[in-house]
Structure formats: structure tokens, C-alpha cells
Image (cartoon, rainbow, N blue to C red):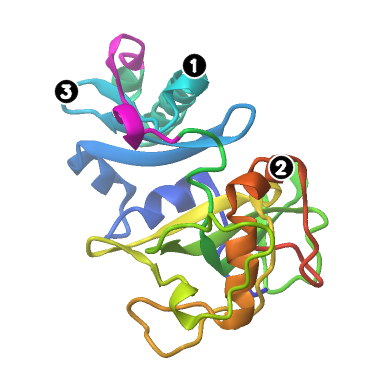
Amino acid sequence: MKGSTSYGTLKENILAACVSTSPKELLARPRWVIPLCGGSPSHWVLTWADISVGELGMFDSIPGQHSRSWAIPLLRHIISAVLGYLGRPEVAALTSSWKRVCITPTGRQQQMDNCSARFYIGEVLGIYKKGTNSRYGSLDSSESLVDLAFLSLCVYLPLSGESTSGDDAMYEDDDSLPSFTKFYHTYHLHTHTPISNILYHLGSKAFDGHDQSTPRLTASAAKHWLTLTRPAVKEKLLKLKISGGKATLV
């Protein structure tokens, strides 16, 4: 595994979101979008704050998990800290009265459980370990998951359906190998994921390398993917870790 960047301080994270070297640039951007992870079991939601209209909002794929109870207060805390740093405490004081918005998918578009939208292949871009004073620092490499906190990943989502075959099914047919994409429309997919969400290490060469736009798994990696995404197996995975070499990574 190879890592690079660090989580850094509040100032460093603000500057990372700016094109210029001035943190005041954020005040010219009315809507801030922040992904958050929390709850039990852990669940990612996409939150936003619109300072131009006084709105705190979130998009939640599992409304039944009631993530609004922790996500909106956490979002308000983050926004207040940023506004305070930018010298706008009077705006931060108003966030308690801002409008709250929660958007969820309808019907079958909703994520049905904590597994259903979590299966993807992640290319490791950064490795983070919790240090002193609750600060997170990056590592260049690691041969173990011990004491690691998060991974920064480039996400590859499957384009084909997940396996529904029986336990005795074989995956020798090349047509059964799933294809993947790292794009949503024209946007690259990236995420930070807790180490506790990592399941299996497919190795450094999981894709065959023939098609960069919609890569396909190698025959060996595809067998692992198709086995792990069977419905009967997925039901057990929240309580299961599978060794995949020196580290258990997706």
C-alpha cells in the first residue's frame, strides 16, 4: 500500500478547497459540500451548507438509519468552526436557525442495507494513522492494518450485475468477468473509508489492463469478487473478515 497526503489542520483543509492561497475565497462560494461518516453501523451521507440562503442539508441513501440525528449537528459544528476561522462568527451564530433539508431516494432506489451499496474496488491513494492529539498523519506504506484509521481510495464501481449463482458455480467463462468504471458521468469517484469497512485485498493487479475506460478484473480477482457479492455471502460479511495476504483490503 502506498500513501501520500495528510488530513491536516482546519486551515490546511480550508486551503485545500481553495484555488488561491487565501482562505477567504470560501466566502465567495455559497454552497459547501462535505461527506460525513458516522452512526452505528457506520454510514456515509453527503451534506451541504448553503450560506447564501441559510440552509443545512444532507442526502441519505438509507433513511431508515436516521443519520440526520448525528449528521446535521456535526455539519453545523463544522460549518460554525469554518465560519469562525474565516472571521464570520455572526454568521456562525445564525446556523442554529437555518433551514434543515434531508433528501432521500424513493422506493427501490434506496440503499436496502449497509452492504448493498458498499461493494466496490478501491485503488489505495493514501493511508492514514491516528497520532497524538487526535491528529491523523499519512504513511508512505504499510504491511498491516494494525493502528491504521482510514484509506483514501479511487473507487471503481461494477457495471455488470453481482453474482446470483449457486455455491458450486464456476467462473471460467470470460463473459462472466465484471467490468468497472471510476466515473460518475464525467466525475472521478473518490472516497475516504474507515479501515473497519475494508474486506479483502485483491492484490496490486486486480484489473487486466486492456481497457482503461471500463477495466475488467483478471480471472483470479473476478472469482473472489463474484463469490463475495453473492447474496448469501453478503448477509454474513458485516461480521466477517477474510484474510487476503498481508492486509485485508478491497
* Residue pointed to by mark 1: 69
The kind of residue tagged 1 is Ser
The kind of residue tagged 2 is Lys
Q: Is residue 228 left or right of residue 93?
A: right
- Tell me if residue 178 is in the magenta stretch: no
Q: Residues within 10 Å of mark 2 (few under 14, many from 20)?
A: few
* Residue pointed to by mark 2: 236
Q: Identify the residue at horizontal 54%, vertical 48% (top origin).
A: 9
The kind of residue tagged 3 is Val
Q: Nearer the viewer, residue 101 or 230?
A: 230
Span colored in magenta: 93-111
Q: Helix, strand, or loop for circle 3? A: loop
Percent coordinates x, y for residue 247 in the rendering: 77, 66
Which image quarter: residue 250?
A: bottom right
Q: Residues within 10 Å of mark 3 (few under 14, many from 20)?
A: few
Percent coordinates x, y for residue 14 in the rendering: 40, 48
- Tell me if residue 107 is in the magenta stretch: yes
The answer for how far apart the CA atoms under marks 3 and 2 are is: 45 Å
Q: Identify the residue at horizontal 34%, vertical 33% (top origin).
A: 108
The answer for how far apart the CA atoms under marks 2 and 1 are is: 27 Å
